[in-house]
Image (cartoon, rainbow, N blue to C red):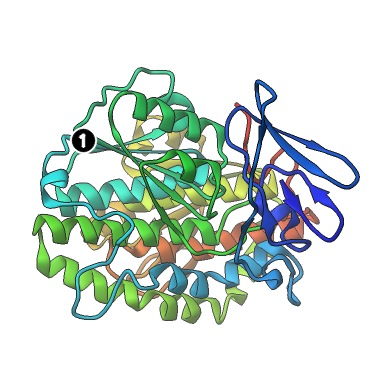
Amino acid sequence: MASGNGEFFISSDIPAYLSATRHFYLLKDNELAILTNNTIEFYDYELNSIQKSFETIDWKTTSTEKNGYTDFMLKEIFEQPTAIRETIGTHIVENQPCQFPELNFTKEFLSSLQKIYIVACGTAMYAGLTGKTMLEQICQIPTEVDIASEFRYRNPIINKNTLCIFITQSGETADTIAALKLAKSKGATTLAISNVEGSSITREADFVTYTHAGPEIAVASTKAYTCQITLLAILVMYFAEILEKKSDLVKELKKAILELPVKTEQFLSNVTQIEDFAKEIYQKEDIFFLGRGSDYHTAMEGSLKLKEISYIHSEAFCSGELKHGPIALIENGTLVVSILTIPELIEKSISNIQEVITRGATTFIITDQDLENCNFTKIIKVPKTNSFLAPILSILPLQLFAYYIAKQKGLDVDKPRNLAKSVTVE
């Protein structure tokens, strides 16, 4: 709920009327609002009158304008350097431990954890997969990633020695909120990562920390995704410092993460190759994505972006699973997109790509490596960074790839059919 200049608004998400007002009333479960032409009154489910004060959301009005871009999605892709920089914020200060005063976790608490669950939906879940990789390899805490709609119905094994991290851009995703309530009922500690202050999930969680991507208007998430991975990386470093684990790696990661905004700007300064390639292949009916390790997580997110806004059938596969079935789908002219950023897996991944080339596939490669003597159709180079952070940079060309294909097809990239920005029902 929100109030403006002699008017009231109802919406499931704050950005829907951010251009009209900054004053928002946040309803809790089992609360009602009655609106007339001139008033707004609040009640509980027993119709007892309750008092609510509005909260002011401090987002810039210009965030809900295109500012010269043809679409919000394109604007939000190019806002990622700023969004990442804002998300890093004061969490990382040179020569100091990572700062999360809103969490104040202790070594005793983190050492007591038997498992961490990361629970989310869609794009946020793919960000969570990258978080899992970092948590297990750096902090050495067993971590599972679960889809919220599955987690809440499978009676997960969680207790007081479990930390459950819930990721949602809007903070209003119904399945994710329900999953959080389930975790709390079983005694787990709950941490919400959201982009929207005062959203429903932030009022339910034991602890909350925010990305600072700013309003994301386009349905297909871009800057929220890269900010989620950025924040997860900083959170992992925070845990590692408290646990006194892998200090040299943490030091290296801090340096690399502070370089991300500039490297993101560097890549986005020239994207004509991606637009040109999209014009060549936009009529494809099937596109497949391949990757190993965190590159596979990027492949899944890239495939989702393409499906969401271009309506082209696409699937992502682990490269090592090709010969276990998916390679049967490859025929002459099939487009295969591969992500190659993990040095120790490059040789095996290239071998997999050669398998699809011999079957007539066209190949589109996203990499930060120097690839020599490779007969790939198209290679897009992204800036090199620590392999844990590579998904933040390697997703950029795939976001643009999906965008330019959809534009070539004449589609509405900001409002794809059948989709909503915030999924507030099951």
Residue 253: x and y in percent read 24, 69
Residue 160: x and y in percent read 22, 30
Query: Which of these two is toward me, 360 or 228?
Result: 228
Say left or right for 31 vs 179.
right
Can see residue 269? yes
Query: Which of these two is toward me, 404 or 329?
Result: 404
Residue 276: x and y in percent read 65, 70
Res 84 → quadrant = bottom left
Q: Residues within 10 Å of mark 1 (few under 14, many from 20)?
A: some
As drawn, which residue projects farthest toward the right? 37
The residue under the point 78% across, 53% down is: 411
Can see residue 370? no
Classify 371 as above or below 364.
below
Q: Amino acid at mark 1?
A: Lys
Q: How many marks?
A: 1
Secondary structure category for the residue under label 1: strand
Say left or right for 196 vs 89.
right
Query: Which of these two is toward me, 295 or 290?
Result: 295
- Residue ID for mark 1: 115
Classify 107 as above or below 341.
above
The residue under the point 80% across, 58% down is: 4
Say left or right for 229 vs 41.
left
Classify 419 as above or below 238.
above
Query: Which of these two is toward me, 305 or 171?
Result: 171
Res 76 → quadrant = bottom right
The residue under the point 37% across, 66% down is: 374
Which quadrant of the rendered structure holds the C terminus? Answer: top right
Say left or right for 124 vs 135.
right
Residue 166: x and y in percent read 41, 41
